[in-house]
Image (spheres, rainbow, N blue to C red):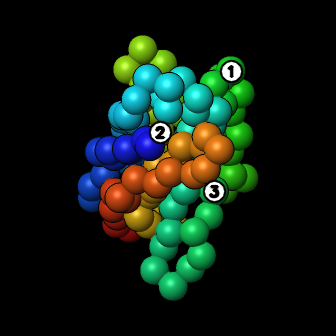
Amino acid sequence: QVQLAESGGGLVQAGGSLRLSCAASGTIFSIISIRVMGWYRQAPGKQRELVATISNSGSTNYADSVKGRFAISRDNAKNTVFLQMNSLEPEDTATYYCYALRSTTYWGQGTQVTVSS
């Protein structure tokens, strides 16, 4: 089992920045067997969509809508993944969910990001 704890959401004006964190916890085996971590988001009335992912080798993947504005990184020593969000737009308003992929997928509870115009 893997538990994911997100933090860092909040209210920000358009053009501002936020940094989300997601700390993974669990047994040593469960942690070291995580292959990919990342973030999805879901806005009201919309489907959940991929934002960014990072593999255990450091390979990253981004949604086209956030390329050049968001950056995902991970601290393997702390089992934590970060999402630095810059130049935020009102369209980025959503609940952001951290996830971790092993043989199954684990999800965090979500953290709200609201960008005002």
Query: In the image, is residue 115 above or below residue 62?
Result: below
Name the residue that disc number 3 marks. 50
Query: In the image, is residue 82 above or below residue 8?
Result: above
Q: Nearer the viewer, mark 2 or mark 1?
A: 1
Camera-side residue of 90 and 84:
84
Instruction: Residue at the far bottom: name it.
Output: 45
Residue 93: x and y in percent read 43, 66
Query: In the image, is residue 26 above or below residue 76?
Result: below
Q: Secondary structure at mark 1?
A: loop
Left or right: 51, with 89 as reference point = right
Residue 114: x and y in percent read 34, 64
Q: Secondary structure at mark 3?
A: strand
Query: In the image, is residue 91 above or below residue 32?
Result: below
The residue drawn where x is 63% and y is 25% is: 56
Name the residue that disc number 1 marks. 57
Disc 2 marks a residue whose amino acid type is Leu
Give the class, few, some or many, for how many residues have Cα within 10 Å of label 2's Cα (few <14, many ≥20).
many
Disc 3 marks a residue whose amino acid type is Leu
Which of the labelled discs sits on residue 32, or is there none? Answer: none
> Looking at the image, can residue 69 be seen?
no
